Amino acid sequence: MEEDVLGKAYDGRLMRRLLGYMRPYRMRIAISLVFLLAQSALQVLGPLLTRTAVDRYIAPTGLPPGWLARFLPADASSGLARIGLLYLAVLASGFVCEFVQTYLMQCTGQLAMFDLRRQLMRHLQDLDLAFYDRNPVGRMVTRVTSDVDVLNDLFASGLVTILGDVLVLVFILAIMFSFSPVLTAIMLTAMPFVILATAIFRRSVTESYRRIRVAIARINSYLQEHITGIVVLQLFNRERLAGREFAEVNRQHMLAFKDAITAYGWFYPVVESISMLALAGILTYGGFRVQAGGLSLGVVAAFLQYGLRFFRPIQDLSEKYNILQAAMASSERIFKLLDTVPSVVAPASPHSAPQTISPIEFDHVWFAYQGEDWVLRDVSFTIAPGETIAVVGHTGAGKTTLISLLLRFYDVQRGSIRVGGVDVRAFDPLELRRMFAVVLQDPYLFTGTLAENIRLGTEGIHDDAVEAAAEQVNLMDFIRGLPLGFGHGIRERGSGLSTGQKQLISFARALAHNPRYLILDEATSSVDTETEFRVRDALNRMVEGRTSVVIAHRLSTIQRADRILVMHKGKLRESGTHQELLAQRGIYWKLYQLQYKDQERVA
């Protein structure tokens, strides 16, 4: 699985691409950096004020109290009061700087991720069907949700805060070294132990995050598959088995998270203990030096405060390392998806679509989904303008593949398909598909109103056209019985509607778009007999004045077709009218006899 790959902790190529999403918001980032710099500087002022208060007013030793003392009064009461006010001002200013910096970066991260998610969605819509044949939907959901969230963590609390932590460390080290190189060296003796603990922590938590990422991807895939197939799940009483399977997937996620929690649980106390030992060393050595008169009490007090501030950025940097590594892995997967080039693309100079109904030609077409496992073999036929063609054949004969190739969901390997004498590969796929309306065997409805499902976002389809389309497909009786009529709310995939109702809505959708070419792919195979009669009546009106291709198993729905094409094992074996094909006593005659016997048996 792609989620299993850890990737580098830092990849300059990926980081440059990621920063490209921040470029439109560079002014926000620049302002955020200014406040970050101010916040980092303010964090080192507090101990300076403490040192000045101690050495100037509380325990003066005769040693220089620091450069801040020259700006303060000699009177202890006034001086301490002013230092207290300054300390309060530093805290308030630090709060304001941190708030502004965090707010700006969080907003910038959200805006950048909004752009990235929008780009991902647009790219997913542009990819051809062959891509989705190879990739499960759950994986794509993980890319757009979990992986993008990881990048948001990097932008909002990763890159800039890493810079802030580094600045704080540099400022603190510089000031501590200016105070006392020896005390600074005592503080730094703890660093090898901190680095060792950090390395162990990083290795442990990185492995946990990898397992968490894999578990989330499996959870998404499992949920998508089993919620989509909930009807089958319940029909076959598979709920308990599915529950046990999901519990195992969920358990892997829980265990991985527990390991990450354990790593965090020991890491922070260990670093805290090491820092306390370093502070104890500073207090011990500093106390002796203060007694000997070689060091002021204010410097020791300041060092203790700086020590507490020194190890906190180190802990944060360890966590930011994991965020950075996770972001690199997520960006690798996201950019791999974005770099996937669709196999079906518009040509550089697309041919304009014909303005009238034109003939459709299949010229020696060969096609295979994989390798040379040919689904279509040397198929040739022509559909005249305004002609209604029916395509029949056994399951797997290649009927639906003909439509997929005509609409250019896939490209043929050999031969060509032409509309108006022009190869379909010369058209922009959007312009090509705009000429067609398709009604599929499984009608798909989106969340929204009934009218919105008929329009499907196409501008220019007015209410009158929607109502006329519904009237023509015998849908108005159903709509008039709804309290809100065309404003009736449709739930996901048309839940709550019968298959026949959903199919009639699909017919109305096709008719409302007023296509030149109409394609019906097994559109009546899953409806009851009464609905089939209504659909058949609507079909007779829909095919008038347009070229139609009807794929059907029920031969009763296509007997009036101008011509019937019989597909068998990927080849066009017979062609003619209903009566002509019966007279040939070939494949079509056998299909008709099988259905007729089935109907007699049912009767």
Image (cartoon, rainbow, N blue to C red):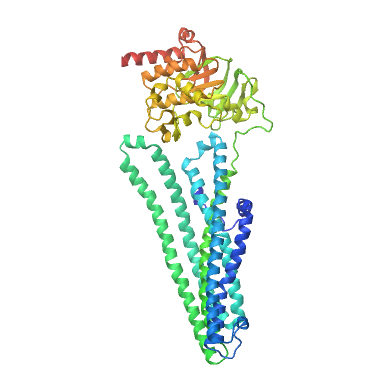
Placement of 255 over or under 305, stated as above or below: above
Can residue 297 be spotted in the picture? no
- The x, y position of residue 302, in whole percent, is 54, 80
| Of 572 and 10, the residue lying toward us | 10
- Identify the residue at horizontal 47%, vertical 15% (top origin): 540
The quarter of the picture where the C terminus appears is: top left
Residue 257 as seen in the image, left or right of residue 90: left
Tally of numbered discs: 0
| Of 253 and 288, the residue lying toward us | 288
- Identify the residue at horizontal 63%, vertical 83% (top origin): 70
Placement of 64 over or under 335, stated as above or below: below
- The x, y position of residue 62, in whole percent, is 59, 91
- Identify the residue at horizontal 54%, vertical 56% (top origin): 106
Q: Quadrant of residue 595?
A: top left
- The x, y position of residue 121, in whole percent, is 54, 41
Can residue 251 be spotted in the picture? yes
Q: Residue furthest right?
A: 349
| Of 268 and 414, the residue lying toward us | 268
- Identify the residue at horizontal 43%, vertical 25% (top origin): 503
